[in-house]
Every structure is written in C-alpha cells, then in structure tokens.
Image: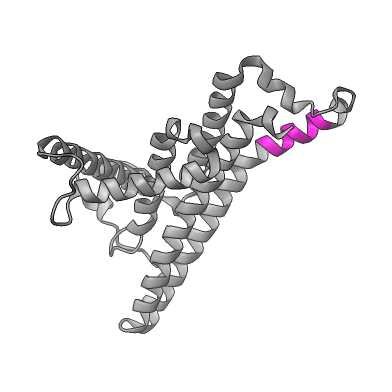
Amino acid sequence: MEHHIFLWVEHIPGLSLLPGHIATSLIVSVALILFAYMAKRQLAAADDVAVPDDSLTCRNMAELLTQGISDMAEGVLGDRAQKYVHLYGSFFLFILIANLSGLLPGFSPPTSNFNVTLALGALSFVAYNFYAFQEQGLAYLKHFVGPIWWLGILMVPLELIDNFVRPFSLSLRLFGNMTGDHVVLEIFTDLTKVVIPVVFYALGAFVSLVQAFVFTLLSMVYVSLAVAHDEHH
C-alpha cells in the first residue's frame, strides 16, 4: 500500500489546487517578501542606520545575510560584485528557506522536485549570459571561439556543450542532494520516532545550508567567467 505523506498545502484553500512544490515555493517566496518588508521598515525607522538594533530583529538578520552574500560575491567577482548581490542573494535565501522547509512537519522541500531546481538552474543560465552581453555586447560571443581563432571549429562545440550543461548540473546536484536528504529523514523518523531523528534533522539543516551555498557560489563563478572572459585570456 502506498504511503501518503501529509502536507499542509493540500489542505489550504487555494493552495490545494496547485502542485505541492509550487504551493510551497509560493509560501517561501511570500515569507521572504514579508521578511524583506519588515527589515526595510525597521531600517527606515532607525534613528541611525549605522547603529544596529539591540535585539535580534529582521533588520539585523537582513544586514548579516547581506554582508555575508556581499563578502562571498566580492571573493568571486571582485570590485564589480555589488552589481550582482541582489540576484545571488535572492538565490541563496530562496534555496536555503526552501531546503529548510522540508524539516518542518507537513512540508516537503520544493527543491526535492526537479521542476523547481531546473527552473533555478535555467534562471542562473539566463542571468550570467544576460550580464555577459550587457558587459561585453556581441564581443561576448568571441569567448566561444577560444584564444586562437583557427581552433574555433573545435572550441565552439565544446564551449556550447559546457554552457548548456551548466543549468542541468546545477539543478541535478541540488535535486539529488535534497531528495536524498528528505528520504533519509523520513525513513529514520518513521523507524525511530524520537531522539535519533534529531541527528538527521541537524544533518538536514547542514545539507540545506551547504546546497544553497554551493548553488549560489557556482552561479557566481559562471557570471565571473562570462563577464571577465577577456581578462582570463
């Protein structure tokens, strides 16, 4: 007999009409928008924006997250990093919260559905190519030929394959890890009920963080290679 997992989204009016991964993705997105709104309000109400709040607030959390993403972006992209922080910060936060949602009873992480991870991978692919054309114009196409023009007949197919594989590798890595983590957590929770699942919840939280970090970091590396290609040559 097939084991049915209870999901809250299947019992919420409106959301129950949507596939579970889409409904949960909408909940995650709305939660992040509300978090950003609260952080903005708290920042606007501050007497001195340079002085952090005394307690843990949405503003403090947002500032810590923004600083962390900015530092990571600067490590990969250098001085031009701030131009891309908003996009890759959004990637990191959405994937992290989507991953962590699978640790809540009655929720399944959207990132354990390949449609969601493929959409994220495709968005990363479109983004770094958009930024590359924005930065270099049609000169960006030269990097597909390689440093020596007469090797273009060999380099163009290889470069095209390399670029078109990237969104699939990003999506498969995230999908595979989150699906495996969710399955392991379900199995040990069903078998042991108490105590032992705590270890796997902690492991699941760690995997969720690492996978959000890896996806974001690789996306930053791709845009770095695209916009600074001439410098590498």
Residue 168 position, x and y percent, is: 61, 43
The residue at the point 18 percent across, 46 percent down is 51
Q: Nearer the viewer, residue 211 or 89?
A: 89
Taking the spot 14% from the left edge, 39% from the top edge, the residue there is 48
Extreme residue toward the right, this view:
150
Towards the viewer: 38 or 25: 38
Residue 95 location (% of width, % of height): 41, 49
Q: Nearer the viewer, residue 202 or 82?
A: 82
| Quarter where residue 83 is shown | top left
In the rendered image, the quadrant that contains the N terminus is bottom left
Could one spot residue 119 in this view of the protein? yes
Tell me: residue 167, above or below residue 65: above
Q: Is residue 113 above or below residue 118?
A: below
Residue 130, picture quadrant: top right
Magenta residues, dominant SS class: helix
Q: Magenta stretch: give its range.
A: 155-163
Q: Residue at x 18, y 39 (%)?
A: 49
Please state if 73 lies on the left or on the right of 41 as rendered.
Answer: right
Residue ID at (45%, 52%)? 212
Residue 5: image location, x then y, percent: 34, 63
